[in-house]
Every structure is written in C-alpha cells, then in structure tokens.
Image: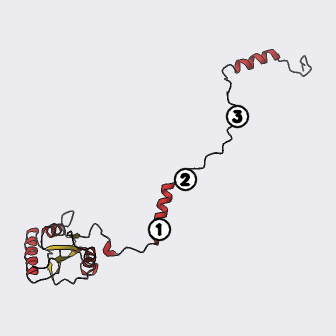
Amino acid sequence: MSSGQDGSGDDRDPVDETALFRRAMADVRRYEDDRADTRPPPPPPRPLQREADERRVVESLLEPPPDPAEVETGEELLYYRAGVQRRVVRQLRRGHYPPAAQLDLHGLTRREAYRELALFLAAAGERGHRCVRVIHGKGRGSRQPQPVLKVSVDQWLRRRDDVLAFASAPENDGGTGAVYVLLRKPG
C-alpha cells in the first residue's frame, strides 16, 4: 500500500486534477440570475366550456319534457302559411281538429295520387270541410330510397292556395303515414 505525500494514500497530483476540472468545465457559462423562481405554480387549467355544457345539461333535465306536438322529427311533415297561428298548428298536430273526410292513396302511382288528391281537396272545399286526412303511407313498400307518395304529397300540398297548414297525424291516427290538412274557409 502506497501512501501519498500527505499520508492519505492517494497518489494523484492535485495540479493534474485542477487542470482536468478546468478542461471539463471549459464550455460552462456563468448563470447571470441565480435567484430561484419563488412564484407559485399556475393553477391547472379549468375546462370552462365543458363545465358550462354540463350545467346546461343539468338545467335541461330539470325542465319539463317538451310537448310531442312541439317536436319535429325528420319523418314528420309540417307546413303552415305565414299568418297561421302557432296555437292552430299545435292543435292540428295534436288532432284537435277532427277530419271531416279522408283519402287513402295507398297503392296508387304518383300520377294517380296527384289526380285523386286534387279532386278530393276540391270536393272538400266545396263541402266546406276545414280539416281532412290524407293517408300517403310511410313508403316502406317503395323500391325508392325514400317514400315516393309521402314526399310528393308534401310538395303538392305546399303549392295549393286552399291549404293553410298540414301536419303528420297523431300516432293513433296514422302517425307519419298520414297528414291532417287544414283548408282555407271557402269564401
């Protein structure tokens, strides 16, 4: 066992170690600001939009459910001319106006259905009927991607001056396979 000059048993030269340290630290730059950042860390971000959405969901759950006559789905037909009161449309959708006559278009071609509908509405107007029911079907037997007669009846009724409004019938009277049509008073 060898001992160094100071008796510690270490043979390394302190001058060589200082030179080694200086070479290792040659690229190190002095840090100008040695003060520690004592600011508290920022609070975690809050998902404000999600919180607002959740509040709206809770509020909507506390509201009474919508009236089925106020909800329009993609399968339902609904049309009313300017000037027709919302109350009247709502009552029409609920079935409050009993139809005085009805026309069933099942099994007819588009051309036949148009002719029958025109004759039926003219006769209903002459008789002074205010509300009639037109059964167009739901189009489930159609080879087309959408119901042919239902779409056609929707277009035809919108073009008629004697039609004030129409809406899909209540479920117990044909649902989305029939419409209640509110006719203008003869005059």
Tell me the kind of residue under disc 2. Arg
Mark 2 vs mark 3, CA separation in Å: 30 Å
State the residue in front, 117 or 97.
97
Q: Earlier in the sequence, mark 3 or mark 1?
A: 3
Query: Residue 130: where, in percent of width, then height?
Result: 16, 81
Q: Earlier in the sequence, mark 1 or mark 2?
A: 2
Q: Find out whether the residues at labels 1 and 2 contact each other: C-beta distance under 8 Å.
A: no
Query: Residue 4: where, in percent of width, then height?
Result: 89, 18
Tell me the kind of residue under disc 1. Glu
Q: Find out whether the residues at labels 3 and 1 contact each other: C-beta distance under 8 Å.
A: no
As helix, strand or loop, the secondary structure at mark 1 comes to helix
State the residue in front, 22 or 43.
43
Mark 1 vs mark 2, CA separation in Å: 21 Å
> Label 1 neighbourhood size at 10 Å, few (<14), some (14-19), many (20+)?
few
- Residue 59 numbered tag: 1
Name the residue: 21% across, 64% down: 146
- Quickly name the residue at label 2: 46
As helix, strand or loop, the secondary structure at mark 2 comes to loop
Query: Residue 187: where, in percent of width, then height?
Result: 9, 79
> Label 3 neighbourhood size at 10 Å, few (<14), some (14-19), many (20+)?
few
41 vs 20, left or right, is left
Tell me the kind of residue under disc 3. Arg
Mark 3 vs mark 1, CA separation in Å: 50 Å
- Quickly name the residue at label 3: 35
Name the residue: 18% across, 76% down: 181
Name the residue: 66% across, 45% down: 40
User: Is residue 87 visible to us here?
Assistant: yes
As helix, strand or loop, the secondary structure at mark 3 comes to loop
